[in-house]
Image (cartoon, rainbow, N blue to C red):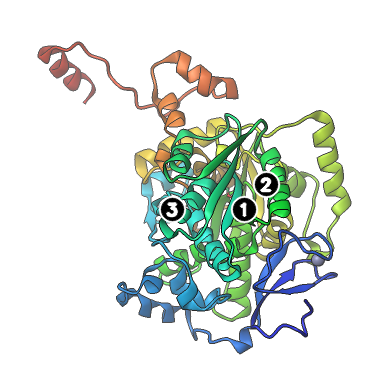
């Protein structure tokens, strides 16, 4: 259990410097057994083979027949070498792309060519979660787990269920809050054959229960408290750099839910910087929904900081205590970030420190308008993903992001994940609009593309096309 006993160049370490307990890579912990803190995967880099430059990874491009070179996660194995390459689980994740979008740049207030969308919806299960799941499954295989569980607002469960059905390595057990999951995501979990447990509560309740159940039944937990998940998610940033021909952008903008992604991005840049593989670190903007804004409040309003690991835990306890007394529950149309108790909060604060980060909150109105603009001028995304674009727009209008900067917004999930939100936005059916969006304070569909209703008559149809087309 001690640093002296371990022989592997990869190990697990408590993120808090005053604890700094280390554990072997083949142990499974939900939290630091010594202090209850979060664990991260750490490496003795000087004992590991490293690329001399990021360009060295390009050698994998001509080896697509090798599944580990083809994988958008494992072609960067040298930067997440916690398991032997041949043991790494892949189902073809990470074939994603960075799309330049001038229409979205214009909407955000940036010049043509300065806004890019990292489209993680192209993953096998339709969200960025597959990057992390490939890594978590690799660790699960390392420790011989046979059952895996997660609490999910939808995409983690879809990803877990898919990896189980394709690899047959484990049985999937998913915990979801009632009535909180988008149909596209629920459809996936059911179709892939996962045991689906619907709890009478919300995500934060489900998250608490799944940790208890995992502990008492010894089930492998794949939520992003799992440090191996974050290793896989580091590669999203590596692919962004790859697509920019190894140029580091000025800004990465990402929605914040459980804060696994933002934490993973910060870790990626911290390591790349320490290894001398990049010359500058981009700035990080994490975007909360107004209805689930714990990070925003703590970081921007209360001034909570990582502070080199000397954290103010009391401030956090007070915040949650008040939240419970007031009975505040997370509520936003962006269900993937409808989370009030983000498990990776401390790691995210560390990422914000590494990347000189900022946090903003955006309304459901801003999220849906941004989503419509991404649909009209990008590749389309689910509501939570559009928070990144809405957040970038805010930061440009505040002058925090300046017009000559290069900005990458992460589109975390596919457009088809939540068809209800999209149809409700574009519908002419006022009742549907009110039921889905109006009750959340969304007043107008600024960029609605209304379907045209017309009689079943050739002349009428031709007339309509002339009129609207
Ligand atoms: C999980 C998820 C998020 C939130 O990511 P965190 O790492 O939990 O902050 C955002 N968008 C989508 C589509 C997701 O599936
Ligand atoms: Zn600890």
Residue 210 bears which disc, if any? 2
What residue lies at 85% left-to-right and 70% top-to-bottom?
18
Q: Residue furthest left?
A: 458
Query: Considering the numbered disc 2 on the image, is that residue within a helix, a strand or a loop?
Result: helix
Residue 37 occupies quadrant? bottom right
Kindly check if marks 1 and 2 are in contact, taking CB atoms under 8 A apart as contact: yes
Location of residue 422 in the rendering, given as x and y in whole percent from the top left corner: 42, 31
Q: Is residue 141 above or below residue 104?
A: below
**Nearer to us: label 1 or label 2:** 2
Q: Is residue 296 visible?
A: no
Q: Residues within 10 Å of mark 3 (few under 14, many from 20)?
A: some
What residue lies at 50% left-to-right and 35% top-to-bottom?
182
What residue lies at 55% left-to-right and 40% top-to-bottom?
196
Location of residue 434 in the rendering, given as x and y in whole percent from the top left corner: 51, 17
| Quadrant containing the N terminus in the rendered view | bottom right
Closer to us: 99 or 158 = 158
Residue 56 occupies quadrant? bottom left
Q: Residues within 10 Å of mark 2 (few under 14, many from 20)?
A: many
Q: Which residue is mark 3?
A: 165
Closer to us: 369 or 47 = 47
Closer to us: 273 or 16 = 16
Location of residue 451 in the rendering, given as x and y in whole percent from the top left corner: 31, 22
Q: Is residue 201 visible?
A: yes
> Looking at the image, how many numbered discs can be counted on the residues?
3
Of callouts 3 and 1, the N-terminal one: 3
Q: CA distance from mark 1 to mark 2?
A: 9 Å
Q: Which residue is mark 1?
A: 223
Q: Is residue 259 above or below residue 292?
A: below
Is ligand 1 less than 8 Å from the beta carbon at label 2?
A: no
Query: Considering the numbered disc 3 on the image, is that residue within a helix, a strand or a loop?
Result: helix
Q: CA distance from mark 3 to mark 2?
A: 21 Å
């Amino acid at each position: 259990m001690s640093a002296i006993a371990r022989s592997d160049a990869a190990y697990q370490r408590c993120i808090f410097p005053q604890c700094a307990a280390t554990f072997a890579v083949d142990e499974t912990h939900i939290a630091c057994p010594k202090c209850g803190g979060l664990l991260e995967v750490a490496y003795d880099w000087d004992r590991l083979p490293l690329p001399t430059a990021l360009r060295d990874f390009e050698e994998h491009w001509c080896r697509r027949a090798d599944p580990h070179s083809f994988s958008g996660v494992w072609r960067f194995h040298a930067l997440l070498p916690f398991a032997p390459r041949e043991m790494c689980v892949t189902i073809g994740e990470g074939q994603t792309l960075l799309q330049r979008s001038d229409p979205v740049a214009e909407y955000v207030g940036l010049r043509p060519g300065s806004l890019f969308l990292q489209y993680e919806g192209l993953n096998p299960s339709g969200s960025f979660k597959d990057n992390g799941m490939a890594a978590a499954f690799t660790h699960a295989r390392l420790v011989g787990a046979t059952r895996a569980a997660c609490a999910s607002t939808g995409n983690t469960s879809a990803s877990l269920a898919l990896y189980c059905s394709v690899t047959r390595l484990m049985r999937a057990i998913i915990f979801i809050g009632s009535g909180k999951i988008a149909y596209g995501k629920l459809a996936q979990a059911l179709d892939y054959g996962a045991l689906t447990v619907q709890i009478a509560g919300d995500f934060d309740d489900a998250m608490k229960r799944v940790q208890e159940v995992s502990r008492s039944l010894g089930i492998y937990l794949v939520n992003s408290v799992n440090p191996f998940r974050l290793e896989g998610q580091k590669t999203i940033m590596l692919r962004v750099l790859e697509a920019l021909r190894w140029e580091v952008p000025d800004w990465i903008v990402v929605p914040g839910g459980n804060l696994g992604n933002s934490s993973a991005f910060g870790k990626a840049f911290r390591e790349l910087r320490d290894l001398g593989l990049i010359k500058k670190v981009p700035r990080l903007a994490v975007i909360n929904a107004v209805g689930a804004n714990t990070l925003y409040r703590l970081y921007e309003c209360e001034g909570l900081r990582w502070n080199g690991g000397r954290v103010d835990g009391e401030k956090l306890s007070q915040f949650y205590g008040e939240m419970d007394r007031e009975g505040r529950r997370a509520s936003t149309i962006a269900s993937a970030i409808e989370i009030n108790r983000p498990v990776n909060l401390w790691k995210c604060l560390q990422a914000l420190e590494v990347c000189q980060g900022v946090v903003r909150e955006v309304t459901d109105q801003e999220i849906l308008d941004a989503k419509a603009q991404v649909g009209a001028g990008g590749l389309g995304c689910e509501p939570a993903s559009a928070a990144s674009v809405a957040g970038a727009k805010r930061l440009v209008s505040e002058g925090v992001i300046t017009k000559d900067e290069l900005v990458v917004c992460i589109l975390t999930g596919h457009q088809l994940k939540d068809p209800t939100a999209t149809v409700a936005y574009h519908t002419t059916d006022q009742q549907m609009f009110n039921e889905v969006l109006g009750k959340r304070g969304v007043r107008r569909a600024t960029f609605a593309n209304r379907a045209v209703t017309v009689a079943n008559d050739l002349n009428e149809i031709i007339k309509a096309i002339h009129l609207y087309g």
